[in-house]
Amino acid sequence: MRILIVGGGILGTAHADEAIRRGHEVIHLEREPEARGATVRNFGLVWVSGRAPNELEAALRSRELWADLAARVPGVGYRPAGSITLMRTQEEVAVAQEVFGRPDADTRGFALLDPDAVRAVNPALRGKFLGGLHCTLDAAVESRQALPAIRSYLDATGRYTFHPATEAREITTTSAGVHIRDDHGRNFEADLVIVCPGATLGGLARDLAGDLPLRRVRLQMMQTAPLGEKLTTAIADGDSFRYYPGFAGSALDHLRTVQPQEPTAEEHRMQLLCVQRLHGGLTIGDTHEYEEPFDFDVDEAPYRHLFGVVETLLGRALPPIVKRWAGVYSQCLDPSQLVHRAQAADNVWVVAGPGGRGMTLGPALAEQTADQLGL
């Protein structure tokens, strides 16, 4: 079968890999010279901890698929390093204790660590905290190098063609299959089209499927110069409990009641996530903005807040910030769905809106699509 995929982000690329694995031919279109959206503006985290019950199975499966992909494509930079969510108040400790006491704690790879045990796992953490919720199943990939590495691997199969700086303008179903016209005047024929538009919800996506049941979310992040020592796990702060549904419960309800966020963190709906890149620098974030239109500039206050939190947890001065950026991703409005997946026309499907879980769930979502469509 010849499959044409529109969108070169993680969802589109994961669907391309899954189709190639199943013996199909893939034509892959990306409107930019290289993917520039949420896929490369993130932490590269494969984040099992905190997933809602309906997400957990897919997250665990996706982690398996990332490990398999890394065996085939070492350039994705996959490492199963785990994470530690650090608690700085007794209320945050209570949330971690409640979560660790649940029946699925082993499934999620959780361990509850005192400060000395935290430092034994991650010696770079020499700052102030009361303990850590360790998730051994969390992992990371190098988001800025993963997609080119995967495409290079797919190209070597002889059944994959990537067309960068190419925008699909028209997709029509014919008796022979699906006809696609691009903005260079070229025409393609395919048996199946999968459109993965990311956060670009107008244009072709709207022409095909109307207004999608998605919202867009904007975030701010930054990256430091090399730290000079190894951060053996990803880290998060107690505010992250507020943003992941897997931590919901009476302890979190109590925390929300008695422990308001610091004003900057509350205003920008913030949590700390931090992962060390292979080059040694730290990727640090993030904020959440839901009301459009989004500002075109970034705010300095969240960066100062995050910088201070990381220094508190590390117990040392951070190296200089070398990059700051904002990004936008799309999120399915139905919380019971991992992604919006719908048929727009005969043999034309739209898949979008993993909601900040693209790197975590991308391979599993592609596998689900392939199973659903009988590929």
Image: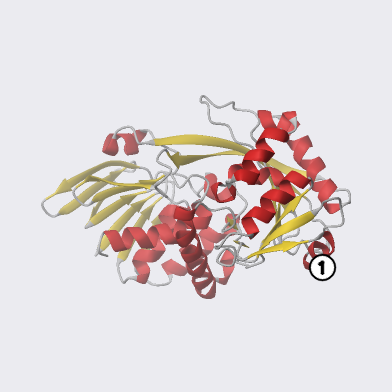
Residue 29, compared with residue 374, is above or below; it is: above
* Residue 85 locus on image (x, y percent): 70, 54
Around disc 1, counting alpha carbons within 10 Å, would you say few (fewer than 14), some (14 to 19), or many (20 or more)?
Answer: few
Residue drawn at (41%, 57%), measured in percent from left and top? Answer: 365
Q: Nearer the viewer, residue 330 or 348?
A: 330
Can you identify the residue that label 1 sits on? 120
SS of the residue at dot 1?
Answer: helix
* Residue 24 locus on image (x, y percent): 30, 67
Residue drawn at (49%, 58%), measured in percent from left and top? Answer: 56
* Residue 189 locus on image (x, y percent): 22, 54
Residue drawn at (29%, 43%), measured in percent from left and top? Answer: 185
Residue 163, compared with residue 301, is above or below; it is: below
The N terminus lies in quadrant: bottom left
Judge whether residue 161 can be spotted in this image: no
Q: Quadrant of residue 28?
A: bottom left
Amino acid marked by disc 1: Ala
* Residue 325 locus on image (x, y percent): 65, 39
Residue drawn at (65%, 45%), measured in percent from left and top? Answer: 251
What residue occupies the far left of the structure in this picture?
175
Q: Nearer the viewer, residue 169 or 200?
A: 200
